[in-house]
Amino acid sequence: MKRAHGTINQSGSEVVNKELAKAREIGVKVQMRAKMERLIVNKDGRVVGIEVRKNYRFPDEKSGSAAFIKAKKAVVLASGGFSRDVRMRMIHDPRLTDRYESTNQPGATGEAILAACKAGAMDVQMDWIQLGPWTSPDEKGFGFVPLFCERLVGYGPMINPKTGKRFFKETGNRKERADAIILLGDPVIIMGDTYAVNKQVFPNALQKGMEVGAIKKFDTLEALAREYNIPVDAFLNEIKRWNGFVEKKKDDDFDCIIFKDARPVLEAPFYAARLWPKVHHTMGGLVINKDAQVMSLDFNPVKGLYAAGEATGGVHGAVRLGGVAMADCIVFGRVAGKNAAAEKAWS
Amino acid sequence: MKIKKLAPVLFCLLVFLAAGRLLWAEARLDMSKAGVKGGNCAACHGQDKVLSKGHVDTKAMNWEACRACHTKDNLSLTGKLPNSHHHLLAGVGCIECHGKTKTPEELDMDKCVSCHGPTEGLAQKTKDIKPTNPHTSPHYGTDLDCNLCHHQHTRSEDFCGQCHSFNFKTP
């Protein structure tokens, strides 16, 4: 489904780059390396500023020194989610120990959300934490394997190395697939033959994924099985079974969507990568209204406090669709910014 | 038996750790020392042995003199000496960056650019570095703050290494 515009660098960072350039052009001071410590609320319950640690050096909690920034009209929180905050995410989903890495930058931690809660904000759906089922334990961060895996589902099977068999619908949603892999307890394999890989996977992603060793190439299916300690006979039978489903374009086992131009897995060499979920997005966060005002525990807006993007919750439901986080940021960011600017200064 | 076998390894480890400790001796940022020449280790480090055993006297040396022995390929100093020392040895002392002050503040990257030139030019210079150019990226273009990788008073870091395996050796 078409639901997002791509950026020139294929990353949300380009949106930020453009915003930063504009902010600098109109003279906005961007304060880097300032860690937010708390919101400052006056006796009327209005947010009037924040306390930060200036010259903070992540993640050294002793670095920097206290400084205060006054907010004449309002504070807009756009601090992102808490995918990298192991302690916080384990409160809400105890499965997500440090065995699960994240596709996010290391500063994706939850202090700003907690600071808002301390100032009276309400949170929602905090345990709806999205894992990418397409990430690899053999490379850092988001990596290249997601670009390999998501182009291959519906063209090649996902295999549980312990049994040599498929275990879940390859074209299932992020949550269903990640949960299925977690339930197995160990990494699984995504694979495709030369036809599928050449047709579907961008050459640059394939090359770079192979360079870092996360994607591997095999002359035979037997060699692939040996590499991942897959029982060979069971695996070869499963490939035969999958190929039968591809021929008739119907998966009797897991109802995977098999694309029209998919062909049986036959053409050597074969390519494969291991998959183990990484924490990708936190759907939960601060409750906002349509004006991007943060809501308090008494269901009224917290005066002078707005929020947008992943710091907020309740926008995406349980399984955020790929690409729409940018729409969330831009739509509610703009709403928040305009309304914050229209607030009456408190002094 | 096991201990005996391990002893040389442990000894080497200790030497290595000690060497690391010496090279990265505690920074003592004292602006009263602002006029000190870069090669005059003792002026700031006192009696601490900050150079390797048998190292020639550096008192009168500048960066060019260091480079007589320490080249990029031989006895490289990359990652072994705080960048503030490189600056000092090249004649750029505390005051040149921080101004005349008793309480030096953290600096913006504008200060780096004012001497080293625009980052676009830097990216051009490093375009052939493998596996990828460290001075431009899809995320930030050429605008990434110098100080995220190149620290002056602590060990530099590979900022990209948070998410990528480029394994840059950052000067």
Image (tube, coloured by chain):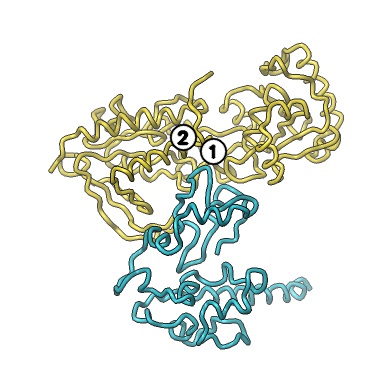
Chain colours: A yellow, B cyan
Q: Is the residue marked by circle 2 packed among few (<14), some (14-19), or many (20+) residues within 10 Å? A: many
The subunit carrying tag 1 is A
**Residue sitting at x 25%, y 53%:** A68
Residue A284 image offset from top left, x and y in percent: 42, 32
Q: Which mark is residue A282?
A: 2
Where disc 1 sits, the SS reads strand
* Amino acid type assigned to the residue bearing label 2 in the image: Thr
Circles 2, 1 touching at the beta carbon (< 8 Å): yes
Distance of label 2 from label 1 (alpha carbons): 8 Å
Instruction: Name the subunit of mark 2.
Output: A
Residue at (71, 42) in percent of width and height: A210
Q: Is residue A87 left or right of residue A132?
A: left
Q: Which mark is residue A279?
A: 1
The number of numbered badges drawn on the structure is 2
- Name the image quarter holding residue A283: top left
| Residue B26 pos. (x, y %) | 47, 75
Which residue appears at 41% of the width and 29% of the height? A328
Quarter residue A213 falls in: top right
